[in-house]
Amino acid sequence: TIHGASKKSSPVHGNWTITQPSQKAPPVDRMAYQTAIASLSKSGYSRTATQLLHRMRSKGFPPDIGCYEALLIGIAKEAGRNANRASESTMNTTANNDEDLTAKSKDETPLHKVALQ
């Protein structure tokens, strides 16, 4: 049995049938929280990881420096990805505006080129 699923034929779930787990899940400890927070942060889910950090603290498990480090690295990576997207969007908009300026005034030098001369 893998996480409460067993391999049997079932028209509803293909080759897998959901069964009741044979044992209770182990208790959640600080290491489980830290692993989940690090994994969520690394995968781009820093907001969820932050919520889990708050839950961890409320359950009486103080996070260590490694937990905060993983969360901050994840937040920084997400911020970098968002900044790159915004920059690319701005560059595309600027390129489109440049084309519009050039198309509107074929006989005049566009203002953005005058400023560079």
Image (tube, rainbow, N blue to C red):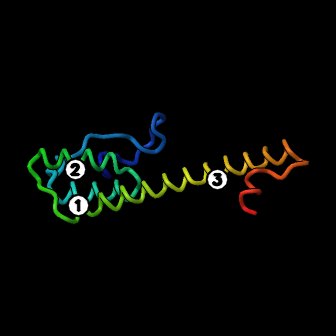
**x and y percent of residue 88 in the render?**
60, 53
Q: Are marks 1 and 3 in contact (CB under 8 Å)?
A: no
**x and y percent of residue 103 in the render?**
85, 45
**Local crowd size for mark 2, using a 10 Å CA cut-off: few (<14), some (14–19), many (≥20):** many
- Quarter of the rendering occupied by the C terminus: bottom right
**x and y percent of residue 99 in the render?**
79, 48
Closest to the camera, between mark 1 and mark 3, is: 3
Residue with the most extreme right position: 107
Residue at image point 38% right, 41% down: 17
Looking at the rendered structure, which numbered label has been put on residue 28? none
Q: Circle 2 — which element?
A: helix
Residue with the most extreme left position: 60
Given the image, on which type of amino acid does mark 3 rest?
Answer: Met
Q: In which image quadrant can residue 19 be found?
A: top left
Give the mark nearer the N terminus: 1 vs 3: 1
Label 1 sits on residue: 67
| Between 107 and 51, the one nearer to me in the picture | 107
**Local crowd size for mark 1, using a 10 Å CA cut-off: few (<14), some (14–19), many (≥20):** many
Gap between marks 1 and 3, in whole Å? 36 Å
Label 2 sits on residue: 53
Give the mark nearer the N terminus: 2 vs 1: 2
| Between 78 and 20, the one nearer to me in the picture | 78
Residue at image point 18% right, 44% down: 55
Given the image, on which type of amino acid does mark 1 rest?
Answer: Cys
Gap between marks 2 and 1, in whole Å? 8 Å
Label 3 sits on residue: 91
| Between 59 and 81, the one nearer to me in the picture | 81
Given the image, on which type of amino acid does mark 2 rest?
Answer: Leu
Q: How many marks?
A: 3
Q: Are marks 2 and 1 in contact (CB under 8 Å)?
A: yes
Q: Circle 1 — which element?
A: helix
Residue at image point 36% right, 55% down: 75
